Amino acid sequence: MNRCRHPAHPHCTVWVMPGADCCAHGHAQPPSGPPVAGGPAAAQGLPSGFEAISALRAGRGATTLRATETLPARPQLHISGFDPRAAGGRQAIRLDLRGMPADCAAELRMLVRSGLRLNAEHHAFQRTSRGDWRPVFLEFSSRGLEHGQYRIDIELHSRQPGHPGSARTWSCSPVILVPRPDASLGEIHQTFLATHKNVRVTADDAGIARVQAPGGGRLDIEVHASNASIAQLDLRDPREQGGRLDLAFSSIAWDEDLIEIDVPLAAAPHPCPAERACLVHVEPDSAAQRHLRLFALDECVLGRYEDIEPDADLLLAHHGEHGLETGGLTRRLSGRHALIRQGRHGFEIEDVSRYGLLLDGVWPGKHAPVPLRLGMRIALTASIRGVAELEVTALWPHGLVLHRVDAGARAEAFCLLAPETDPGSGDGVQAGVQPRAAALPPLFHRGGGFWHRDPATGIDTPLAPGMALERLRGLGAALRFTARPYPEQDRGRDRRALSPAPSVRDLRTPARSPSWLGA
């Protein structure tokens, strides 16, 4: 007798009588005898069962199997080690990749989002020299959460360095059940296994499935074996154990199919890639802010104004009766005074300074992030009032606007945008705009640069130096775009480098500031 030789079922181990057309499972058998050169087997190029199993388990030969169309490889994410009895505490599940195509990158970036308390949202799968993938352990906690089902959204991104067109993305959404604290082990497993059987025996990864139940009585047992596996269960006479037999499962494992997402082609590159920029108002006597400074950073640092090598991104200085003062009260600002970042529930601010800050007149405490609200007043510092004070005048899902409410109100305003975020992709964050910021143009950051969106037509236009901004709705001819957040610093350095040594007359005459430096 021979084993089942159907090429599409290499894991079938049923013996077939000589001359039989199919096995006990109904798998058609190829003609007996050695294949003739040019025969059906050679024409189809069917691999043997042993070769197919070896290629499948080693992760190699995926291209060959797809070429013959006998055993297509399906990318799957194997989830194991989940113990529902640990509900309410810290858990760790193991994730293994199976059936990934050979042309994907050697390192896959995994992004995870869930209502569970994840330890980390960014992970990476790395391919070993043997061709398989190192497992990733996903840690989470369900402490304090309501019992029920929680979805885990997983995305895998493959990016080949130097090959923009090779980007591929897979996704899956496994569901984790958080049981009630008082749920019994039998109820938990009955919910997960979703079967009417008393016992289910499952084997995988080359195990043996065998059931031996001597003695009388009725037993409803389901045995499942897959992937050349054998599951073994030996049941003694229940009467020898007092008529009762308890079985327990330590953990639960399952496979999730990875669905490949059609990644659109990369858009045209931005004409002026920048994370920091500025809209300069060239009319010195205008009532509008002279500079609208744009930032698109994951974390924006607010700190003291410095001409050379500042420690912050958003530079603040005290404005007195005669304009900008780089000394005096400005020295009461720390080099790194506060941080503004986008948190889970919107934008938040954190005090990291030496002198503190006040939020609506209250010190929030050091290293204590506080969500920003529309109309909130941010005073730097807490020890001396009036050094620099800002107000949140616009709060969107993709950014916020800060206006100065001190003597520097006509000099500058700040627009902080989330990088690579479309204005319409907010996740339930309530937006609001005060009248002071209602006239600001709709701006956002995407593709490495800043964009303007027409609120009437929805047309997006990239911002770059030298372009005619008067054609854009909300922008006038008096505005100029520059890819530097503080263009006055560069121009001041150039003028100092090119100007000759001052004469005695120049020292007696007070110097006039450029008209576009601000009042």
Image (cartoon, grey):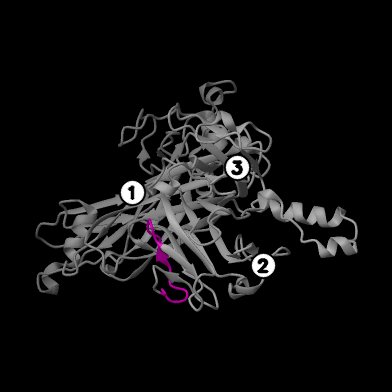
| Residue 489 pos. (x, y %) | 72, 56
Tell me the mark number nearer the camera, choosing from 1 and 2: 2
Q: Is residue 32 above or below residue 161?
A: above
In this rendering, position of residue 134 left or right of residue 79 = right
Alpha carbon distance from label 3 to label 1: 25 Å
Q: Amino acid at mark 1?
A: Gly
- The chief SS type of the magenta part is loop
N-terminal label among 3 and 2? 2
| Residue 492 pos. (x, y %) | 76, 55
- How many numbered badges does the structure rendering display? 3
Element carrying mark 1: loop
Please give the residue where the numbered disc 2 appears in the rendered image.
326
Q: Amino acid at mark 2?
A: Thr
* Residue 404 in sight from this viewpoint: yes
Q: Amino acid at mark 3?
A: Gly
Which residue is painted at 45% across and 34% down in the image? Answer: 7
Which residue is painted at 30% across and 67% down in the image? Answer: 250
Which residue is painted at 68% across and 49% down in the image? Answer: 515
Please give the residue where the numbered disc 1 appears in the rendered image.
428
Characterize the local packing of mark 1: few (<14), some (14-19) or many (20 or more) Cα atoms within 10 angstroms: few
In this rendering, position of residue 236 left or right of residue 366 = left
| Residue 457 pos. (x, y %) | 45, 27
Characterize the local packing of mark 2: few (<14), some (14-19) or many (20 or more) Cα atoms within 10 angstroms: some
Q: Residue 36 lies in what quarter of the image?
A: top right
Q: Which residues are magenta?
A: 363-376
Query: For this rendering, which residue is in front, 491 or 71?
Result: 491
Query: For this rendering, which residue is in front, 304 or 60?
Result: 304
Element carrying mark 3: strand
| Residue 292 pos. (x, y %) | 57, 49
Q: Which labelled disc corresponds to residue 449?
A: 3
N-terminal label among 1 and 2? 2
Alpha carbon distance from label 1 to label 2: 41 Å
